[in-house]
Amino acid sequence: MWRFTVVLSFCFPLCFPAHAADCGPTPYACAVFYVQHGDLQAAIQSLTIQLRQSPRDLKALNLLGIALTESGQARQANGRFQEALALDPHFYPARKNLAINEFDAQRYREAEIQLNRVLLDAPDDQISHVYLGEIGFERKDCAAALRHYKQGYSRIAQKGLWVLHDAQCELKRKNAPRAIAVLQLLRGNDAADRFQGGLLLGRAGACAEAAEFFGSSRKGYSDPYAAGYNQLLMLTRAARYTQAIQLFSQLVGEGYGKAELYNLVSEDYVKTGQLKKAYDALRTATKLEPEAEDNYVDLAMLCLQYENYDLGLEILEVGLHYTPNSYRLHVQRGVTLVMTGHMQDAEKEFQAASALAPEKALPYVALSEVWMQSGQTEKAVELLRSKSNLPGTDFIVPFIFALSLIRSGASAGTPRGMEAIQALERSIRRKSDFARSHAELGQLLLKAGDTDRGIAELEIATKLDPNDAGPLYQLGMAYRRKGQKAKAESFLARVAQIHSPEHELDMKQELKRLVRLDTGPSEAQAKP
């Protein structure tokens, strides 16, 4: 709480306490001394004496209000401030202190009225502007809050919470540079507020700056491990991988060899090309916390990404031993088995995953691929038909459903042909920039006689993927049928330049993409 105090420079012949000679020549001077040294009762006693002799003493009334406020008697304090204002409505120090008491009591409307009246007498009073900024912040009106914070900027640093609120409003308005500048006002030894500053910046995506704030809070913060972990996390997100690895070694040397740290630093090792160290870090994490699912998921994902399938299966077997009901581990094992050609075993894993999480789409996509590769296309069609309309499913589900219909012989103008068109349209609504959905839809529409729509979809496909010869060839033939020879020849010439067959969806790579989106790797979160 910030109060305005004034010391009188002249004396009164009053009765003083026995120890008055030690505190000053007047009761008011003694009261100032006592307030400064935390002896509030002595201050109140001295001011009471002062006011008996001079009941219209504005400064004494104001200081008595301050002493009463600090001693927990806000109601009585407000009475003294109001007495001073009754004597002189323009004595703004008392009005400001009254406003601050109203603010502290969460009577924001009353505080706002008083503060605005203060500014009529003292337009540049920065503390009044800061408190008006705080009222704006409490009302979630950052535009109003920032106007006042800027006018009270030189006083913001007096309270860490004010700095944080100012920065939070700047971040809400996407003004990260000024938020960072404001946070620099935090005192270097204010570890708790600097930690909170790091959280604000991290949530706003200013990861490099957030790392600096977490780093500066580590020595004095109540939880130095949380500060160190967050610093490592922010360095990783800021792509400061070498610094992150150095910090990891430092944290482990300080006795913080926790599984989540090993998990986190594995990404830094991957990004710096130290693949073996990444594997070792994640294996250490699984040993430190053998029942933590995330560590197995992340290690298996690394094996899948870098095609180390044997190690991936070994890790997944251990993980499923400790967490047998893990949907994510069953899905990863199924995808890894697909990569190694063990389709029947993969089918069992996908069925297990589906039973554990029936709302998830990935097991159905994976199962349908296994069945289509083994000639069980109708089985895939029936499964995907029941799942492709589920809300929240990935765009790939209706796309694969359409492909399964096409592979099963669906032709233009038939119910299955219409079903395939509708599935592709659904896929496009979910992901409009997936070229293959536009390409397949365009070809079906051409076969159904809807030439103009078919051409439109194929042209979208060629813009999204200019190197796919299939849609270019189909466009050339479509324009030739329409008699637009120049356009037809231009598209067919592009086909000749590409010298590549029509693109086919690489389902194995698509499964890798889907399993990454659906099951991991785990996203490390900042520690509050």
Image (spheres, grey):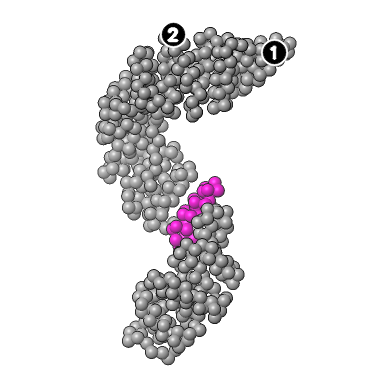
Query: Which numbered disc flags the more N-terminal residue, 2 or 1?
Result: 2
**Between 54 and 270, the one nearer to me in the picture:** 54
**Residue 67 in sight in this render:** yes
**Between 283 and 122, the one nearer to me in the picture:** 122
Instruction: Please say whether residue 345 is one of the residues in the magenta stretch.
Output: no
List x then y, in percent, for residue 470. Answer: 59, 13
Q: Residue at x 46, y 11 (%)?
A: 378
Q: Amino acid at mark 1?
A: Tyr
Residue at which label 2 appears: 375
Instruction: Please say whether residue 174 is one of the residues in the magenta stretch.
Output: yes
- Occupied quadrant, residue 146: bottom right
Mark 2 or 1: the one toward you:
2
Q: Is residue 480 above or below residue 86?
A: above
List x then y, in percent, for residue 134. Answer: 50, 59
Q: Amino acid at mark 2?
A: Gly
Q: Residue furthest bottom?
A: 13
Q: Is residue 222 above or below residue 423?
A: below
Check the picture and name the quadrant holding the N terminus. Answer: bottom left
Look at the numbered disc 1 and give the secondary structure of its residue.
Answer: helix
Residue segment shown in magenta:
155-184
Look at the numbered disc 2 and give the secondary structure of its residue.
Answer: loop
Q: Are marks 2 and 1 in contact (CB under 8 Å)?
A: no
Residue at which label 1 appears: 479
Q: Is residue 520 left or right of residue 253?
A: right
List x then y, in percent, for residue 400. Answer: 50, 18
- Occupied quadrant, residue 125: bottom right
Q: Residue at x 47, y 82 (%)?
A: 8
List x then y, in percent, for residue 308. Answer: 35, 21
Mark 2 is surrounded, within 10 Å at the Cα level, by few (under 14), some (14 to 19) or many (20 or more) other residues, namely few
Q: Residue at x 39, y 43 (%)?
A: 526
Q: Is residue 322 above or below residue 421?
A: below
- Prevailing secondary structure of the magenta residues: helix
